[in-house]
Amino acid sequence: MSRSARPALGVAAAGGAALLFGVNGTVAKLALEAGLSSTRLVELRSLGAAMCLMALALLIRPGALRASPRELVFLAAAGVVGIGLVQWLYFEAIARLPVGIAILLEYLAPVLVALWVRFVRREPVRPRIWAALGLCLLGLGLVAEVWSGLTLDGLGVLAGLAAAVSLAAYYLTGEHGLGTRDPLSLAAWTFTAAALLWTVPQPLWAFDWSVLGESVALPGPFDGSTAPLWSLVAWVVVLGTVVPYGMVLLALGSLGATRTGLLGMAEPVTSAVVAWVVLSERLSTAQLVGAVVVIGGIVAAETARRDAARHEPAPPATAVV
């Protein structure tokens, strides 16, 4: 493949990942509304993704899965915080908020990362970080319609913000982990840790698997149609996790972390559009304006770290939601 074709391939991969991740929010919400708990959905998603990623790693680079006991502790912590808690908090948020707003809250993570780099690591950060922070705060005020006494569910907002904190931790631990291992083995181990996090308190043998055979009524343009619950879960695992994550890795190799992250900002937009079409989750004019302002702030934060940071291992450039 020619070098000139690689950027185009990277753009297509990043765009495809954003589209699939965006659709995934609506599919996950349908599964939650059908009665599947957020913790069980996280468990099934993490377990399914872990099995797929581990199998792929064993097939392609089995030696890369080797890890010392000390590294296993790090991988377990990264998986619990950066995968298990992020997914659970995101599912809690979309159960209480419009999908587009929930993912917008989670995508505040790059702002938190830039602030962490500035004040904890004391690395140089471009002054635009303050503009990014201001835009995000202004945009969130519009999204929440603060002049009306906050129109959003409080627990949903807290879950979305907590998801942003966990996602920021995922970016930072992922950046550290990619300094010593390849992205595929890192993903395989962290998803395995996330699966174990939820399998211990709710064993698989205690789950009524017959529930997955129940029919789910589909809304919006699919009104009148049904789908078995297992097909929604399968979508969340395969097309909502494994495939788009692989696309992100492909985009990272072609475009780098910053460009991939910026293209990934199409995900909140896609999520909101799909939820509007399928779930009829309409946002007010003020909320739409606020969403645009927040995205502008996130884009500014994504590019706030100075050029020297480009020589560090690239962090995971998108959320796995």
Image (cartoon, helix red, strand yellow):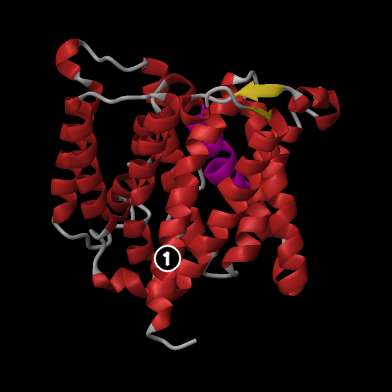
Q: Residue furthest right?
A: 205
Helix, strand or loop at disc 1? helix
Q: Nearer the viewer, residue 114 or 35?
A: 35
Judge whether residue 192 can be spotted in this image: no
- Bounds of the magenta span? 76-91
Residue 186: quadrant of the picture? bottom right
Q: Residue furthest top?
A: 149
Query: Residue drawn at (39%, 67%), measured in percent from left and top?
Result: 11
Judge whether residue 150 can be spotted in this image: yes
**Would you place residue 113 above or below residue 138 in this image?**
below
Instruction: Indicate the position of residue 153 as horizontal and vertical percent values.
Output: 37, 16
Instruction: Indicate the position of residue 16 as horizontal and vertical percent values.
Output: 46, 57
Q: Is residue 244 left or right of residue 123?
A: right
Query: Residue drawn at (44%, 88%), measured in percent from left and top?
Result: 2
Residue placed under numbered mark 1 in the picture:
12
For badge 1, the amino acid type reads Ala
Magenta-colored stretch includes residue 41: no
